[in-house]
Amino acid sequence: MPDSWISTAAHLDAFVRELYPICRSITGDGLRQTLRAIQGRIPLELREVPSGTKVLDWAVPLEWNIRDAFVANERGERLIDFQRHNLHVVNYSEPIRKRMTLAELRPHLHCLPAQPDRIPYRTSYYERSWGFCLTANALAALPDGEYDVCIDSSLTQGALSYGELLLPGALPDEILISAHTCHPSLSDDNLSGIAVAVALAQELSQRPARRHSFRFLFAPGTIGAITWLAQNCETASRIRHGLTLTCLGDSQPFTYKRTVSGQASIDRAAARVLARTGAAHQAIDFFPYGYDERQYNSPGFRLPVGSLMRGRHGQFPEYHTSGDNPDFTSGDRMFESLGVLRAIVDELEADVRYRNLEPYGEPQLGSRGLYRALGGTSIPNLQFAMLWVLNLSDGEHGLLDIAERAKLDLATIREAASLLESHGLLARA
Amino acid sequence: MPDSWISTAAHLDAFVRELYPICRSITGDGLRQTLRAIQGRIPLELREVPSGTKVLDWAVPLEWNIRDAFVANERGERLIDFQRHNLHVVNYSEPIRKRMTLAELRPHLHCLPAQPDRIPYRTSYYERSWGFCLTANALAALPDGEYDVCIDSSLTQGALSYGELLLPGALPDEILISAHTCHPSLSDDNLSGIAVAVALAQELSQRPARRHSFRFLFAPGTIGAITWLAQNCETASRIRHGLTLTCLGDSQPFTYKRTVSGQASIDRAAARVLARTGAAHQAIDFFPYGYDERQYNSPGFRLPVGSLMRGRHGQFPEYHTSGDNPDFTSGDRMFESLGVLRAIVDELEADVRYRNLEPYGEPQLGSRGLYRALGGTSIPNLQFAMLWVLNLSDGEHGLLDIAERAKLDLATIREAASLLESHGLLARA
Amino acid sequence: MPDSWISTAAHLDAFVRELYPICRSITGDGLRQTLRAIQGRIPLELREVPSGTKVLDWAVPLEWNIRDAFVANERGERLIDFQRHNLHVVNYSEPIRKRMTLAELRPHLHCLPAQPDRIPYRTSYYERSWGFCLTANALAALPDGEYDVCIDSSLTQGALSYGELLLPGALPDEILISAHTCHPSLSDDNLSGIAVAVALAQELSQRPARRHSFRFLFAPGTIGAITWLAQNCETASRIRHGLTLTCLGDSQPFTYKRTVSGQASIDRAAARVLARTGAAHQAIDFFPYGYDERQYNSPGFRLPVGSLMRGRHGQFPEYHTSGDNPDFTSGDRMFESLGVLRAIVDELEADVRYRNLEPYGEPQLGSRGLYRALGGTSIPNLQFAMLWVLNLSDGEHGLLDIAERAKLDLATIREAASLLESHGLLARA
């Protein structure tokens, strides 16, 4: 096991554990603190969009902050305590301070009967409300009586925060990597996505040359993507490929969720990479639910943004419960996810489209030292690759197409293209 | 069994039995009498097109009427008698009155050796000729001798009759339902098609709202469709979908015959409906034989008209014989056929194409009361349907497309679209 | 077995045996002598293109001729002798006359360790070099010592020779039949292709009417096709279909190699013909290696030229060895190949595209005597074929399409089209 592997995997895990305790939401200091932690690793630019700003069909909501919350019995013992787990409070709860009976309190308590040891994750972003989440066992054990209920939160004119990083490339065309950043203490969803995105950004920033420009977006789900789209329409028009990242730290096989068209370059690149892993994996068609691919793929934008994940939205028991904690995810799995993500990005980077500058017949490779001198019965792969690249570089096919059709690996096709380009036989289309 | 079921099935059967004895042809009083019987049930408009009128590449033929026909032996006994069964006369026979030997008569006699108890149905529309049809057993029993042969028919300047009914809808776009009306005493082919078409017209006329306009056409096969097309070119250009109806009263599984393209909306609607029946059925590709779908699908018109049937043209023993009588068909089977036909029509009615009026990102459904307030892990079908309708209402997809892609039932998709439309988020494209 | 069969098969074999001893190359007298032998059978026009002429990205090379070559021991015994087999010399070897040790000679000797009894075929067209080929057994038996090495060849300003024959047809549109003519004593590759092409040309020249014009090209591989393309750009633009012929005399099943698009008419015609043979065969996708289909399918030309062969390039042991001699090929196999080739050509000849001149509804066939008078239950194939031809003659479909869709044989479809054309119902599109 190479050191870098141990090191990267360990860093991924450590970053998840560092961010885990923070109580994030779609606005507020927990979100801001998370973006600053990312900024400690990559040069993220932070944006603050004031509450009330009109964004597409929505408006930026009030900023939510929370200091404390509990349900205490008459003896002052906290039976439900935000300080012990921030999932105990329904995210975005309005403030309350009141004594009430269990019967009055009960409609505000949420549990998971099927998983009696886990606290569920609940939100109430767009309707003023408050509530607590607790395990079904704890709920069952609550005696009748009077309770002091306190949520020391605030909903005030403030801002929605997000962070973005642009790594410029040779082309203005962008690849978008987007991770939602609003979930509180949930590890797989989506600290794993954040950590893997950060690690990729670190790697790409070290590359001597990038063909595409890369945009990393860390923003709260739905309203964050909508805010970004509203304020960056022109930038959005330069996005050629994209991925949302989520649930990349669990031990399930990879799932790739396609774009609306299902035939975008990102769809084909993901299919190729996952096929190469040799491991179980699946590709599923787009559906307008899940994460921010919903917004990017909306009919007004139709950005070809797929989604890379391991465990699927709502389809594993730990999803949106206290079971989704740093012991559920692992650095090794995130390291694997980073490898798949990097490979997909590399396919897109490699998918150059060339134009054959000598398209009439085959150019004479021999006189350029590109072809074996002695005619025999077979042909080395690199020479065959050159013939394929020449034949299909008609402005319609990129190197990925050519590699698929030639059934040669992309590295050989790229080497062939590079040789031909350096001999003046190809130009970038 | 609901009363309406018994009632409709019984009415279908009764109508077939009422029409059965009439000697129809491609022109003449039998045809006219049939159209008037239909007019007794739906407000059909009758048309008369004079003999000799040029219609496309054809001309309306002379009008044929027949009063009596027989072959009698020297004792005056009618051995073949039109009064007993109108199939006994080759349809459109010219008049004859002559005494002749069996040998002279023999070339004018037609039977079915493979079905010795059945009278075949034969026509001679476009070549002047005469003849009789009888069972093979009866033919074998004819003694040598002299016979009095009489066909008391007339071929005169008259008219070709057809009937049509337009039920206007919100759209000028029409759905054509066409049934050929020229066959004499044959029950499945096509009194069943006529009866089912009439029943559908009755139902649709009661609907408070129709999206499409519906045109019902009752006309003789081939020359009737050609005459209608010749005289209604502009109307034909408004036909968006169509079906010819035939053989809908027998007990065979359903067959749907596709349009020339095979990919018309009617083709997809029929496939979906038949799949939903759960019963055996088949869809077959278009071929230029059968009924008037041949004319509608001709290259100059290319109207997307499919064909709905049970028993297939020429593929069951009773076809075009005296075996195709009201005991071969049943009201229950016609009632089933009416259900399938109605379901196909309903799919087309439901296949509205909308335009998302907030296409940039997802509109905020929560603030409009269209989305559950408390965020959890799953989403009700109706809300999911709204997201699908919003995502795919880009002017390219109708509700049928959306239902197929979403794998949700059309009713849910329609309800979602209706909710979104009432909230100003969708407009009809 | 009909006489013509014996006769044609025998002639094919005899022609291969006549041409076999000649030492061909990409230029020179062996090539010229071969073209003149072809000229003895069909009125080929010979072209000479001077050395140094710029052709596309290439230049016509120097003309190579050879009189003698050997490796002799000190006693003057020829241990390797061009006079015994012209494969003994690396084709296009520069002249040499030198005494050298076996160690010095060894790098210039080529054998086939896996087939120790066969002489390999090697060339060095585009790099000045020389060498000998011999069996591995002979190489192993060469004693140490000094050798007299002689290649009495010349590389001089001369010309590249090729021959072409145009058989004009009703259309200016051409079908190209191309056979490479540069290989020395190799029978299957490509004397078989040459012989079959000549036989087809003989047959077609006898036909009273050809729809397409046919162009036969006999030219050296690669540089010959490139030279022809360079000098015949305008002609190339008239090529609608084409085939390269190679390895048509061995006993393997047929292989058809598709054009780049894989969907050209020639691809479909070949698929249909091979399916009809009932025998094992395969169709493979285009790849830019093999024979001159590489040049014709290059992106600047994209001529739809497939390739017909039996044994595949490089995939049988005799390929490019002395094992590929007239005993390896047979007249019977070439006769079979001629039959497949003729059938493919006939499909293309038959694939006329018509326009229905009465496209609105079906024209009245009965009044034109094209339809049975008495209506019954079935329809003869020829009448059905007429209905299909009328329905699909919309300018988009040729007779091949119609035959495929109607599942009727092409002969019936052609007869139907011919009848309809003669009655003024169809015109060539």
Image (cartoon, coloured by chain):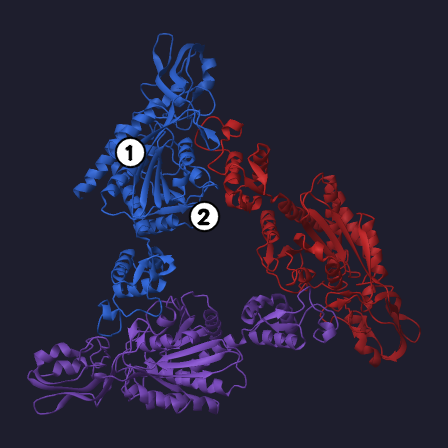
Chain colours: A red, B purple, C blue
- Tell me if label 2 and label 1 are in contact, CB under 8 Å: no
The kind of residue on which mark 1 rests is: Leu
In the rendered image, the residue lying farthest to the right is A75
- Quarter location, residue B104: bottom left
Query: Relative to residue A223, is residue C340 depicted above or below?
Result: above
Looking at the picture, does residue B6 appear above or below residue C131?
A: below
Label 1 marks a residue whose chain is C
- Answer with mark 2 or mark 1, whichever residue precedes in sequence: 1
Q: Which residue is depicted at the point 27% across and 47% down?
A: C210
Q: Can residue C246 be seen?
A: no
Q: Given the image, what chain letter belongs to the residue carrying mark 2? A: C
Eyeballing the image, is C217 above or below C95? below
Horizontally, residue B113 falls left or right of residue B235, namely left
Per the image, label 2 sits on a secondary structure element best described as loop
Instruction: Give the x, y percent position of residue A95.
Output: 87, 72
Kind of element beneath mark 1: loop
- Is residue B167 among the parts visible in the rendering? yes
- Which quarter of the rendering shows the N terminus of chain A? top right
Q: For residue B208, what is the image quadrant? A: bottom right
Whether labels 2 and 1 belong to a single chain: the reply is yes
Q: Nearer the viewer, residue C112 or B243?
A: B243
The answer to which image quadrant residue B384 occupies is bottom right
Between label 2 and label 1, give the one nearer the viewer: 1
Q: Position of residue C300 (x, y in %)?
A: 48, 41
Along the line of sight, which residue is nearer the eye, B64 or C179? B64
Q: Which residue position is annotated with label 2?
A: C261
Q: Where residue B60 sits: x, y (%)?
A: 29, 78
Q: Is B62 situated left or right of B45 in this image?
A: left
The x, y position of residue B212, in whole percent, is: 50, 78
What residue is pinned by disc 1?
C44
